[in-house]
Image (spheres, rainbow, N blue to C red):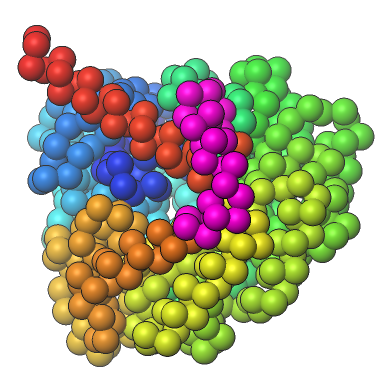
Amino acid sequence: MKVCLIEPSKFVSLTNFVSTISMPPIGLAYIATALRQAGHEVSVVDGPGSAPRNFFIFKGVRVRGLSREDLVQRIPQDSEIIALGCMFTSNWVYVRELVKDIRDRFPQAKLIMGGEHVTGFPELSLQQAPLDAVVLGEGEEIIARLLEHLKKDLPLSELAGVAFRTADGNIQINPRHRRIKDIDSIGWPAWDLFDIQQYNEVNQPHGASQGRFMPMLATRGCPFQCTFCTSPNMWTTEWIARDYKNVIDEMQHYQKLYRTSDFQFEDLTAIVRKDWIIDFCDEIVARGMKVTFQMPSGTRSEAIDAEVAQKLKAAGCHEFAFAPESGDPRILKAIKKKVKLPDMYESARNAMHAGINVGCFFIIGFPEDTYLSVFRTYGAMIKCAWKGFTNVNLNAYSPQPNTESFQELQKNGVITELDDKYLMSLFTFQDFGAKKTSYNPKFGDYELSFMVIFGQGLFYVFYFLRKPRRILELLVDLVSDSARNKSNKMAKSALKDAFMIVKSRLAGVFK
Protein backbone atom coordinates (compact mmCIF):
# COMPACT_ATOMS: atom_id res chain seq x y z
CA MET A 1 0.00 0.00 0.00
CA LYS A 2 1.04 3.61 -0.52
CA VAL A 3 1.53 5.21 2.89
CA CYS A 4 2.25 8.84 3.72
CA LEU A 5 3.58 9.52 7.22
CA ILE A 6 3.13 13.01 8.63
CA GLU A 7 4.92 14.87 11.41
CA PRO A 8 2.60 17.82 12.17
CA SER A 9 3.95 21.32 12.75
CA LYS A 10 4.28 22.19 16.43
CA PHE A 11 3.45 24.90 18.91
CA VAL A 12 6.48 26.95 19.90
CA SER A 13 7.13 29.69 22.46
CA LEU A 14 10.41 31.48 23.11
CA THR A 15 9.82 31.06 26.84
CA ASN A 16 8.97 27.34 26.59
CA PHE A 17 12.34 25.62 26.21
CA VAL A 18 10.99 22.20 25.21
CA SER A 19 8.97 23.73 22.36
CA THR A 20 12.08 25.34 20.83
CA ILE A 21 13.78 21.96 20.38
CA SER A 22 14.12 20.98 16.72
CA MET A 23 14.91 17.27 16.45
CA PRO A 24 14.32 14.70 13.71
CA PRO A 25 11.19 12.68 14.69
CA ILE A 26 12.70 9.37 15.70
CA GLY A 27 9.35 7.68 16.41
CA LEU A 28 8.04 8.38 12.92
CA ALA A 29 11.35 7.25 11.38
CA TYR A 30 11.06 3.89 13.18
CA ILE A 31 7.50 3.49 11.91
CA ALA A 32 8.67 4.24 8.35
CA THR A 33 11.20 1.41 8.58
CA ALA A 34 8.62 -1.03 9.96
CA LEU A 35 6.23 -0.26 7.10
CA ARG A 36 8.96 -0.61 4.49
CA GLN A 37 9.90 -3.99 5.94
CA ALA A 38 6.24 -5.00 5.66
CA GLY A 39 6.36 -4.22 1.93
CA HIS A 40 4.62 -0.84 1.83
CA GLU A 41 5.66 2.19 -0.23
CA VAL A 42 6.39 5.00 2.24
CA SER A 43 6.65 8.77 1.84
CA VAL A 44 7.01 11.41 4.57
CA VAL A 45 5.85 14.99 5.08
CA ASP A 46 7.84 16.48 7.96
CA GLY A 47 6.06 19.70 8.97
CA PRO A 48 8.65 21.12 11.41
CA GLY A 49 11.68 19.77 9.54
CA SER A 50 10.59 21.06 6.12
CA ALA A 51 10.14 24.65 7.31
CA PRO A 52 11.92 25.08 10.65
CA ARG A 53 12.15 28.86 10.25
CA ASN A 54 8.52 29.37 9.27
CA PHE A 55 6.29 30.63 12.09
CA PHE A 56 2.58 31.40 12.03
CA ILE A 57 -0.17 31.97 14.58
CA PHE A 58 -2.94 29.49 15.42
CA LYS A 59 -5.48 30.44 18.10
CA GLY A 60 -3.06 32.94 19.59
CA VAL A 61 -0.13 30.50 19.75
CA ARG A 62 2.91 30.48 17.47
CA VAL A 63 3.43 27.36 15.35
CA ARG A 64 6.72 26.24 13.76
CA GLY A 65 6.75 24.45 10.40
CA LEU A 66 4.62 24.07 7.30
CA SER A 67 1.18 25.65 7.32
CA ARG A 68 -1.76 23.23 7.19
CA GLU A 69 -2.40 24.16 3.55
CA ASP A 70 1.23 23.62 2.52
CA LEU A 71 1.45 20.35 4.42
CA VAL A 72 -1.71 18.91 2.88
CA GLN A 73 -0.53 19.89 -0.61
CA ARG A 74 2.66 17.85 -0.11
CA ILE A 75 0.79 14.61 0.56
CA PRO A 76 1.00 12.40 -2.57
CA GLN A 77 -2.37 12.28 -4.34
CA ASP A 78 -2.30 8.47 -4.59
CA SER A 79 -1.82 7.91 -0.84
CA GLU A 80 -4.01 5.07 0.41
CA ILE A 81 -2.99 5.39 4.05
CA ILE A 82 -2.17 8.69 5.76
CA ALA A 83 -0.71 8.26 9.25
CA LEU A 84 0.20 11.02 11.69
CA GLY A 85 2.11 11.13 14.95
CA CYS A 86 1.03 13.20 17.94
CA MET A 87 3.26 12.97 20.97
CA PHE A 88 2.15 15.97 23.04
CA THR A 89 -1.53 16.36 23.88
CA SER A 90 -1.18 20.16 23.90
CA ASN A 91 -0.48 19.97 20.16
CA TRP A 92 -3.76 18.12 19.61
CA VAL A 93 -5.66 21.43 19.45
CA TYR A 94 -3.76 22.13 16.21
CA VAL A 95 -3.39 18.57 14.93
CA ARG A 96 -7.12 17.79 14.97
CA GLU A 97 -7.71 20.70 12.55
CA LEU A 98 -4.96 19.33 10.31
CA VAL A 99 -6.69 15.93 10.31
CA LYS A 100 -9.94 17.60 9.21
CA ASP A 101 -8.11 19.33 6.35
CA ILE A 102 -6.57 16.03 5.27
CA ARG A 103 -9.95 14.32 5.34
CA ASP A 104 -11.45 17.04 3.14
CA ARG A 105 -8.66 16.62 0.59
CA PHE A 106 -8.44 12.80 0.80
CA PRO A 107 -11.95 11.50 1.52
CA GLN A 108 -11.11 7.92 0.46
CA ALA A 109 -7.81 7.49 2.32
CA LYS A 110 -7.61 5.77 5.67
CA LEU A 111 -6.44 8.17 8.40
CA ILE A 112 -4.44 6.68 11.28
CA MET A 113 -2.68 8.26 14.22
CA GLY A 114 -0.21 7.04 16.82
CA GLY A 115 1.79 8.45 19.72
CA GLU A 116 1.38 9.29 23.37
CA HIS A 117 -1.61 11.57 22.88
CA VAL A 118 -3.90 9.01 21.22
CA THR A 119 -2.63 6.29 23.56
CA GLY A 120 -3.76 8.41 26.50
CA PHE A 121 -6.96 9.73 24.91
CA PRO A 122 -8.08 7.30 22.17
CA GLU A 123 -11.81 8.01 22.55
CA LEU A 124 -11.36 11.79 22.59
CA SER A 125 -9.15 11.63 19.50
CA LEU A 126 -11.67 9.60 17.51
CA GLN A 127 -14.53 11.82 18.68
CA GLN A 128 -12.88 15.11 17.76
CA ALA A 129 -11.17 14.23 14.47
CA PRO A 130 -12.18 12.12 11.44
CA LEU A 131 -9.63 9.39 12.12
CA ASP A 132 -10.36 5.80 11.11
CA ALA A 133 -8.15 4.20 13.74
CA VAL A 134 -5.46 4.97 16.32
CA VAL A 135 -2.49 2.88 17.42
CA LEU A 136 -2.04 2.39 21.16
CA GLY A 137 1.46 2.22 22.65
CA GLU A 138 4.53 0.87 20.87
CA GLY A 139 3.69 1.12 17.20
CA GLU A 140 5.94 -0.91 14.88
CA GLU A 141 4.21 -4.29 15.07
CA ILE A 142 0.71 -2.88 15.51
CA ILE A 143 0.68 -0.55 12.52
CA ALA A 144 2.00 -3.30 10.24
CA ARG A 145 -0.82 -5.60 11.40
CA LEU A 146 -3.35 -2.78 11.08
CA LEU A 147 -2.40 -2.10 7.48
CA GLU A 148 -2.58 -5.79 6.68
CA HIS A 149 -6.15 -5.86 8.04
CA LEU A 150 -7.09 -2.74 6.08
CA LYS A 151 -5.57 -4.09 2.86
CA LYS A 152 -7.47 -7.37 3.16
CA ASP A 153 -10.62 -5.66 4.53
CA LEU A 154 -10.45 -7.78 7.69
CA PRO A 155 -12.42 -6.77 10.83
CA LEU A 156 -10.48 -4.76 13.45
CA SER A 157 -12.59 -5.99 16.36
CA GLU A 158 -9.99 -8.47 17.58
CA LEU A 159 -6.81 -6.62 16.58
CA ALA A 160 -4.92 -5.83 19.79
CA GLY A 161 -3.42 -2.39 20.21
CA VAL A 162 -5.90 -0.32 18.20
CA ALA A 163 -8.98 1.81 18.76
CA PHE A 164 -11.25 2.51 15.82
CA ARG A 165 -14.53 3.84 14.55
CA THR A 166 -17.00 1.06 13.78
CA ALA A 167 -19.30 0.95 10.74
CA ASP A 168 -22.20 2.28 12.82
CA GLY A 169 -20.13 5.22 14.07
CA ASN A 170 -19.34 3.89 17.54
CA ILE A 171 -15.84 3.79 19.02
CA GLN A 172 -14.21 0.53 20.06
CA ILE A 173 -11.01 0.39 22.13
CA ASN A 174 -9.30 -3.00 21.94
CA PRO A 175 -6.96 -4.47 24.58
CA ARG A 176 -3.32 -3.47 24.35
CA HIS A 177 -0.78 -5.39 22.28
CA ARG A 178 2.22 -6.96 23.97
CA ARG A 179 5.52 -5.08 23.96
CA ILE A 180 8.21 -6.08 21.46
CA LYS A 181 10.70 -8.22 23.40
CA ASP A 182 13.44 -8.47 20.79
CA ILE A 183 13.93 -4.79 20.08
CA ASP A 184 17.15 -5.53 18.20
CA SER A 185 14.90 -6.99 15.50
CA ILE A 186 13.47 -3.51 14.86
CA GLY A 187 15.17 -1.88 11.89
CA TRP A 188 17.08 1.36 12.32
CA PRO A 189 15.09 4.56 11.63
CA ALA A 190 14.53 5.46 7.96
CA TRP A 191 16.42 8.75 8.11
CA ASP A 192 16.78 8.86 4.32
CA LEU A 193 13.19 10.14 4.26
CA PHE A 194 14.07 13.19 6.39
CA ASP A 195 16.24 16.26 5.86
CA ILE A 196 18.94 15.61 8.47
CA GLN A 197 21.11 18.41 7.07
CA GLN A 198 18.33 20.93 7.70
CA TYR A 199 17.99 19.88 11.33
CA ASN A 200 21.72 20.26 11.86
CA GLU A 201 21.72 23.70 10.28
CA VAL A 202 19.00 24.81 12.70
CA ASN A 203 21.11 23.27 15.49
CA GLN A 204 18.56 23.20 18.30
CA PRO A 205 18.83 19.68 19.76
CA HIS A 206 17.44 18.48 23.05
CA GLY A 207 20.74 18.71 24.90
CA ALA A 208 23.72 21.04 24.53
CA SER A 209 25.03 21.70 21.00
CA GLN A 210 28.23 19.74 20.50
CA GLY A 211 28.44 19.38 16.73
CA ARG A 212 26.46 17.52 14.08
CA PHE A 213 23.88 15.51 15.99
CA MET A 214 21.45 12.62 15.65
CA PRO A 215 18.77 11.33 18.02
CA MET A 216 19.23 7.80 19.32
CA LEU A 217 17.34 5.21 21.34
CA ALA A 218 19.29 2.56 23.22
CA THR A 219 16.42 1.39 25.41
CA ARG A 220 12.63 1.43 25.53
CA GLY A 221 10.34 1.91 28.47
CA CYS A 222 10.92 2.74 32.12
CA PRO A 223 10.65 0.34 35.09
CA PHE A 224 9.12 2.93 37.42
CA GLN A 225 5.52 4.02 38.12
CA CYS A 226 5.59 7.79 38.71
CA THR A 227 2.00 8.95 39.11
CA PHE A 228 2.36 11.98 36.80
CA CYS A 229 4.17 10.27 33.92
CA THR A 230 2.64 8.90 30.71
CA SER A 231 5.26 6.15 30.39
CA PRO A 232 3.41 3.43 32.37
CA ASN A 233 0.44 3.81 30.01
CA MET A 234 2.43 4.25 26.81
CA TRP A 235 5.19 1.69 27.39
CA THR A 236 4.07 -0.24 30.49
CA THR A 237 6.75 -0.55 33.18
CA GLU A 238 8.96 -2.90 31.19
CA TRP A 239 12.45 -1.54 30.46
CA ILE A 240 14.19 -3.27 27.54
CA ALA A 241 17.71 -2.51 26.35
CA ARG A 242 19.12 -3.08 22.89
CA ASP A 243 22.35 -4.98 22.40
CA TYR A 244 24.98 -2.34 23.14
CA LYS A 245 27.00 -3.40 20.10
CA ASN A 246 23.99 -2.87 17.85
CA VAL A 247 23.59 0.64 19.25
CA ILE A 248 27.24 1.43 18.58
CA ASP A 249 27.04 -0.03 15.08
CA GLU A 250 24.21 2.41 14.39
CA MET A 251 26.25 5.31 15.79
CA GLN A 252 29.18 4.45 13.54
CA HIS A 253 26.81 4.22 10.56
CA TYR A 254 25.68 7.81 11.19
CA GLN A 255 29.28 8.92 11.63
CA LYS A 256 30.03 7.74 8.11
CA LEU A 257 26.73 8.71 6.47
CA TYR A 258 26.01 12.09 8.10
CA ARG A 259 29.38 12.99 9.68
CA THR A 260 27.64 12.86 13.06
CA SER A 261 29.81 13.63 16.07
CA ASP A 262 27.19 14.11 18.82
CA PHE A 263 24.43 11.67 19.77
CA GLN A 264 21.33 12.72 21.70
CA PHE A 265 19.88 9.71 23.52
CA GLU A 266 16.13 10.29 23.84
CA ASP A 267 15.57 7.29 26.12
CA LEU A 268 13.08 7.64 28.95
CA THR A 269 15.58 6.08 31.37
CA ALA A 270 18.82 5.35 29.57
CA ILE A 271 20.90 4.16 32.52
CA VAL A 272 19.30 1.44 34.61
CA ARG A 273 21.74 -1.48 34.50
CA LYS A 274 25.34 -0.78 35.47
CA ASP A 275 26.73 -3.71 33.47
CA TRP A 276 25.03 -2.51 30.26
CA ILE A 277 26.35 1.04 30.45
CA ILE A 278 29.88 -0.14 31.31
CA ASP A 279 29.92 -2.54 28.35
CA PHE A 280 28.56 0.24 26.13
CA CYS A 281 31.25 2.71 27.19
CA ASP A 282 34.07 0.16 26.98
CA GLU A 283 33.03 -0.78 23.43
CA ILE A 284 33.07 2.86 22.28
CA VAL A 285 36.57 3.27 23.69
CA ALA A 286 37.72 -0.05 22.21
CA ARG A 287 36.56 1.03 18.73
CA GLY A 288 38.43 4.31 19.05
CA MET A 289 35.35 6.41 18.33
CA LYS A 290 35.68 10.17 18.76
CA VAL A 291 32.15 11.17 19.71
CA THR A 292 30.15 12.99 22.33
CA PHE A 293 26.78 11.86 23.61
CA GLN A 294 24.15 13.22 25.94
CA MET A 295 21.12 11.95 27.81
CA PRO A 296 18.77 14.92 28.19
CA SER A 297 15.93 12.96 29.84
CA GLY A 298 16.00 11.85 33.45
CA THR A 299 18.78 9.47 34.54
CA ARG A 300 18.55 7.18 37.57
CA SER A 301 21.04 8.41 40.14
CA GLU A 302 21.57 4.99 41.75
CA ALA A 303 23.16 3.77 38.51
CA ILE A 304 25.92 6.41 38.56
CA ASP A 305 28.90 5.77 40.81
CA ALA A 306 32.52 6.88 40.42
CA GLU A 307 33.38 3.95 38.13
CA VAL A 308 30.40 4.51 35.82
CA ALA A 309 31.02 8.26 35.71
CA GLN A 310 34.65 7.77 34.64
CA LYS A 311 33.60 5.24 31.99
CA LEU A 312 30.92 7.60 30.64
CA LYS A 313 33.37 10.47 30.34
CA ALA A 314 36.02 8.33 28.65
CA ALA A 315 33.43 7.22 26.07
CA GLY A 316 32.38 10.80 25.32
CA CYS A 317 29.42 11.53 27.60
CA HIS A 318 29.11 15.29 27.87
CA GLU A 319 25.93 15.85 29.84
CA PHE A 320 22.98 14.13 31.47
CA ALA A 321 20.18 15.06 33.83
CA PHE A 322 18.56 13.69 36.96
CA ALA A 323 14.81 13.94 37.53
CA PRO A 324 14.01 14.01 41.26
CA GLU A 325 10.98 16.29 40.57
CA SER A 326 10.67 17.44 44.21
CA GLY A 327 12.93 18.40 47.08
CA ASP A 328 10.47 17.08 49.67
CA PRO A 329 10.63 13.37 50.66
CA ARG A 330 6.87 13.40 51.39
CA ILE A 331 6.07 14.49 47.84
CA LEU A 332 8.52 11.97 46.38
CA LYS A 333 6.64 9.22 48.18
CA ALA A 334 3.24 10.57 47.09
CA ILE A 335 4.21 10.67 43.40
CA LYS A 336 5.98 7.28 43.62
CA LYS A 337 9.32 8.79 42.67
CA LYS A 338 11.85 6.27 43.90
CA VAL A 339 14.80 8.58 44.39
CA LYS A 340 16.84 9.53 47.45
CA LEU A 341 18.17 13.07 47.24
CA PRO A 342 21.43 12.43 49.16
CA ASP A 343 22.24 9.59 46.74
CA MET A 344 21.45 11.85 43.79
CA TYR A 345 23.84 14.53 45.05
CA GLU A 346 26.55 11.91 45.48
CA SER A 347 25.99 10.60 41.95
CA ALA A 348 26.14 14.16 40.64
CA ARG A 349 29.40 14.75 42.50
CA ASN A 350 30.90 11.66 40.85
CA ALA A 351 29.76 12.79 37.41
CA MET A 352 31.01 16.37 37.81
CA HIS A 353 34.33 15.13 39.20
CA ALA A 354 34.67 13.08 36.00
CA GLY A 355 34.02 16.21 33.92
CA ILE A 356 30.36 15.61 32.95
CA ASN A 357 27.79 18.42 33.07
CA VAL A 358 24.78 17.56 35.21
CA GLY A 359 21.26 18.97 35.08
CA CYS A 360 18.09 18.41 37.06
CA PHE A 361 14.30 18.50 36.62
CA PHE A 362 11.89 19.73 39.28
CA ILE A 363 8.12 20.25 39.37
CA ILE A 364 5.99 22.30 41.75
CA GLY A 365 2.23 22.45 42.00
CA PHE A 366 1.58 18.74 42.48
CA PRO A 367 -1.87 18.23 44.04
CA GLU A 368 -0.01 17.04 47.16
CA ASP A 369 2.29 20.11 47.32
CA THR A 370 2.21 22.63 50.15
CA TYR A 371 4.13 25.88 50.67
CA LEU A 372 6.59 23.93 52.81
CA SER A 373 7.23 21.32 50.11
CA VAL A 374 7.74 24.08 47.53
CA PHE A 375 10.27 25.80 49.80
CA ARG A 376 12.07 22.47 50.19
CA THR A 377 12.18 22.14 46.40
CA TYR A 378 13.65 25.66 46.21
CA GLY A 379 16.25 24.55 48.73
CA ALA A 380 17.15 21.53 46.61
CA MET A 381 17.51 23.77 43.55
CA ILE A 382 19.82 26.15 45.40
CA LYS A 383 21.86 23.16 46.56
CA CYS A 384 22.10 21.98 42.95
CA ALA A 385 23.34 25.41 41.85
CA TRP A 386 25.95 25.55 44.60
CA LYS A 387 27.14 22.00 43.98
CA GLY A 388 27.84 22.82 40.32
CA PHE A 389 24.81 21.63 38.34
CA THR A 390 24.82 23.42 34.98
CA ASN A 391 21.05 23.59 34.54
CA VAL A 392 17.81 23.04 36.39
CA ASN A 393 14.38 23.03 34.73
CA LEU A 394 11.50 23.97 37.00
CA ASN A 395 8.02 23.33 35.62
CA ALA A 396 4.48 23.55 36.92
CA TYR A 397 2.65 20.28 37.48
CA SER A 398 0.43 19.23 34.59
CA PRO A 399 -2.04 16.31 34.59
CA GLN A 400 -0.94 14.34 31.56
CA PRO A 401 -3.43 12.09 29.74
CA ASN A 402 -4.66 9.04 31.61
CA THR A 403 -1.86 9.09 34.20
CA GLU A 404 -2.57 7.93 37.74
CA SER A 405 -2.51 11.53 38.93
CA PHE A 406 -4.88 12.63 36.14
CA GLN A 407 -7.34 9.87 37.02
CA GLU A 408 -7.29 10.95 40.67
CA LEU A 409 -8.09 14.54 39.69
CA GLN A 410 -10.98 13.31 37.56
CA LYS A 411 -12.26 11.18 40.43
CA ASN A 412 -12.16 14.18 42.76
CA GLY A 413 -13.96 16.43 40.29
CA VAL A 414 -11.00 18.74 39.66
CA ILE A 415 -10.93 17.84 35.96
CA THR A 416 -14.48 17.61 34.66
CA GLU A 417 -14.08 17.99 30.90
CA LEU A 418 -11.33 17.65 28.32
CA ASP A 419 -11.84 21.07 26.78
CA ASP A 420 -9.31 23.26 24.98
CA LYS A 421 -8.48 25.08 28.21
CA TYR A 422 -7.27 21.82 29.73
CA LEU A 423 -5.48 20.76 26.54
CA MET A 424 -3.61 24.06 26.26
CA SER A 425 -2.64 23.97 29.94
CA LEU A 426 -0.41 21.04 28.93
CA PHE A 427 1.61 23.49 26.80
CA THR A 428 1.71 26.51 29.11
CA PHE A 429 2.91 24.49 32.12
CA GLN A 430 6.43 24.65 30.65
CA ASP A 431 6.11 28.23 29.40
CA PHE A 432 7.62 30.88 31.66
CA GLY A 433 5.88 33.60 29.70
CA ALA A 434 2.37 32.18 30.11
CA LYS A 435 -0.05 31.85 32.99
CA LYS A 436 -0.06 28.37 34.49
CA THR A 437 -3.17 26.38 35.36
CA SER A 438 -3.02 25.24 38.97
CA TYR A 439 -4.47 21.87 39.90
CA ASN A 440 -3.55 22.39 43.55
CA PRO A 441 -6.26 23.93 45.80
CA LYS A 442 -3.62 25.83 47.79
CA PHE A 443 -2.21 27.79 44.85
CA GLY A 444 -3.99 30.02 42.36
CA ASP A 445 -2.98 30.17 38.70
CA TYR A 446 -1.05 33.43 39.01
CA GLU A 447 0.52 32.38 42.29
CA LEU A 448 1.82 29.16 40.77
CA SER A 449 3.07 31.08 37.73
CA PHE A 450 5.03 33.43 40.00
CA MET A 451 6.43 30.56 42.07
CA VAL A 452 7.80 28.86 38.94
CA ILE A 453 9.47 32.04 37.64
CA PHE A 454 10.82 32.85 41.11
CA GLY A 455 12.23 29.36 41.60
CA GLN A 456 13.90 29.25 38.19
CA GLY A 457 15.40 32.69 38.78
CA LEU A 458 16.58 31.57 42.21
CA PHE A 459 18.61 28.76 40.69
CA TYR A 460 20.34 31.02 38.18
CA VAL A 461 21.17 33.68 40.80
CA PHE A 462 23.15 31.09 42.73
CA TYR A 463 24.39 29.47 39.51
CA PHE A 464 26.12 32.67 38.42
CA LEU A 465 27.18 33.66 41.96
CA ARG A 466 28.89 30.29 42.32
CA LYS A 467 30.99 30.89 39.18
CA PRO A 468 30.71 34.45 37.81
CA ARG A 469 32.81 33.48 34.77
CA ARG A 470 29.72 31.65 33.49
CA ILE A 471 28.35 35.01 32.38
CA LEU A 472 31.29 35.41 29.99
CA GLU A 473 30.98 31.78 28.87
CA LEU A 474 27.31 32.38 28.05
CA LEU A 475 28.14 35.45 25.96
CA VAL A 476 30.81 33.50 24.07
CA ASP A 477 28.41 30.60 23.42
CA LEU A 478 25.75 32.95 22.07
CA VAL A 479 27.97 33.80 19.10
CA SER A 480 29.52 30.35 18.57
CA ASP A 481 28.32 27.20 16.78
CA SER A 482 28.19 25.12 19.95
CA ALA A 483 27.15 25.43 23.59
CA ARG A 484 29.13 24.09 26.51
CA ASN A 485 26.01 23.20 28.53
CA LYS A 486 22.23 23.00 28.31
CA SER A 487 21.62 26.37 30.02
CA ASN A 488 23.64 28.18 27.36
CA LYS A 489 21.98 26.15 24.62
CA MET A 490 18.52 27.18 25.90
CA ALA A 491 19.52 30.84 25.69
CA LYS A 492 20.92 30.33 22.17
CA SER A 493 17.74 28.61 20.98
CA ALA A 494 15.50 31.39 22.29
CA LEU A 495 17.73 34.02 20.68
CA LYS A 496 17.76 32.17 17.33
CA ASP A 497 14.00 31.83 17.21
CA ALA A 498 13.46 35.42 18.31
CA PHE A 499 15.71 36.62 15.47
CA MET A 500 13.90 34.50 12.89
CA ILE A 501 10.47 35.61 14.11
CA VAL A 502 11.48 39.28 13.86
CA LYS A 503 13.02 38.60 10.43
CA SER A 504 9.84 36.93 9.14
CA ARG A 505 7.70 39.79 10.43
CA LEU A 506 9.92 42.37 8.73
CA ALA A 507 9.82 40.37 5.51
CA GLY A 508 6.04 40.46 5.67
CA VAL A 509 6.05 44.22 6.19
CA PHE A 510 8.45 45.04 3.39
CA LYS A 511 7.29 42.43 0.88
Residue at point 56%, 85% (across, down): 329
Q: Is residue 202 visible to us here?
A: yes
Residue at horizontal 74%, vertical 30%?
A: 291
Residue at x-position 85% and y-position 60%: 306
Q: Residue 19's spot in the image, x, y percent?
A: 35, 44
Q: Is residue 48 above or below residue 115?
A: above
Which image quarter: residue 105?
Answer: top left
Asked whether 481 or 338 is in front, the reply is 481
Spot occupied by residue 205 in the image (x, y as percentages of width and height):
50, 36
Q: Residue furthest right?
A: 286
Residue 52 horizontal side relative to residue 139, left or right = left
Foreground residue among 11 and 168: 11
Quadrant for residue 60, please give it: top left
Query: Viewer-proximal residue, 507 or 57?
Result: 507
Q: Main secondary structure of the magenta part?
A: helix
Q: Is residue 138 above or below residue 7?
A: below
Q: Quadrant of residue 340?
A: bottom right
Image mark count: 0
Query: What is the magenta range?
Result: 460-483
Q: Is residue 477 magenta?
A: yes
Question: Relative to 379, does residue 148 appear above or below in the rendering?
Answer: above
The residue that appears at 48% across and 67% down in the rendered structure is 362
Q: Is residue 166 visible?
A: no
The foreground one among 163 and 369 is 369
Q: Position of residue 189 (x, y in %)?
A: 56, 33
Q: Which quarter shows the N terminus?
A: top left
Viewport quadrant of the C terminus = top left
Q: Is residue 85 magenta?
A: no
Residue 296 horizontal side relative to residue 404, left or right: right
Task: Decide if residue 158 is on the left or right side of residue 386.
Answer: left
Residue 149 in percent (x, y) is at 39, 47
